Amino acid sequence: MATSGTTDFNLAIDDLVEEAFERCGMRMTAGYQLTSARRSLNLLFLDWANRGLNLWTIEETTASLSQGDTTITLPTDTVNVLSAVIRQTINGQQQDISIDRIGREVYLDLPDKLTQARPAQYYVERSNAPKVYLYPTADTGYTFVYYRIRRIQDAGDYTNTSDVNFRFLPCLASGLAYMISLKYAPERAGPLKQIYEEDFQRAAMEDRDTASSFFIPQVGY
């Protein structure tokens, strides 16, 4: 027997909603139910941002620094910054130099925030308009290179597919079914929540970096 030869299965938003309603033991019969389900789907995406790393939403981004720059305005869809380096070119050679992240209170206690040198520390202000504060202030041109977590894209049109890695499609369907059940089938909410949490845990365990790590203790004498 022949196989399909394809590996690109996905679900459009309207198909995803239909699957979720069927898991609730219902058939979607009204246009408002579709609108309500899309709203629940967008809330589900926000919940995933609070649950931890989603590897497909990690992006490398850069920002140019000029002398005297103390802050960097991040894209508004930035959830968090994972790591960063300061990049500079010396004698035609690119160098990436690590830079440490500090907390709000540590940055606040710095006595002279306008001291100019190569930035060695940064503080991330996680707000609706996220920013990075650098210390020391840049004394010349650099590039701030960082890995950020971006927000999962909104559902949008019903013909769209979701901004979700294929490994999370089963979890997405069960999660949306649970969200819908809270409004339309509360008697099924308990079992659907359990299925959702199991699906999410299974997907999250696979959605991780599998590179080997080695820990070497530092022994003092």
Image (spheres, grey):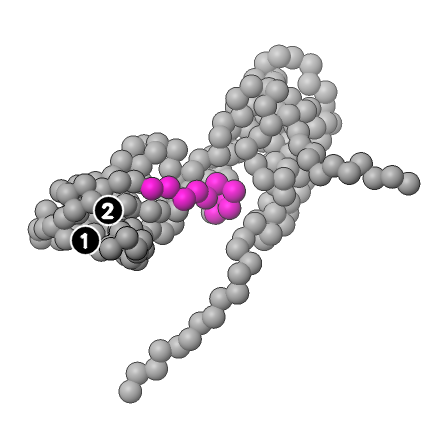
Marks 2/1: CA–CA distance = 8 Å
| Above or below, 11 relative to 149 | above
Q: Which residues are magenta?
A: 53-62
Q: Is residue 7 left or right of residue 128?
A: right
How many numbered discs, if any? 2
Kindly tell me whether residue 182 is visible in this rendering.
no
Q: Is residue 74 left or right of residue 109?
A: right
Is 60 a magenta residue?
A: yes
Is 56 a magenta residue?
A: yes
Residue labelled with disc 1:
118
Does the CB distance between marks 2 and 1 fall below 8 Å? Answer: yes
Residue 221 position in % (x across, y down): 29, 87
Instruction: Report which quarter residue 41 is drawn in.
Output: top right
| Above or below, 96 relative to 160 | below
Residue labelled with disc 2:
142
Residue 9 position in % (x across, y down): 70, 34
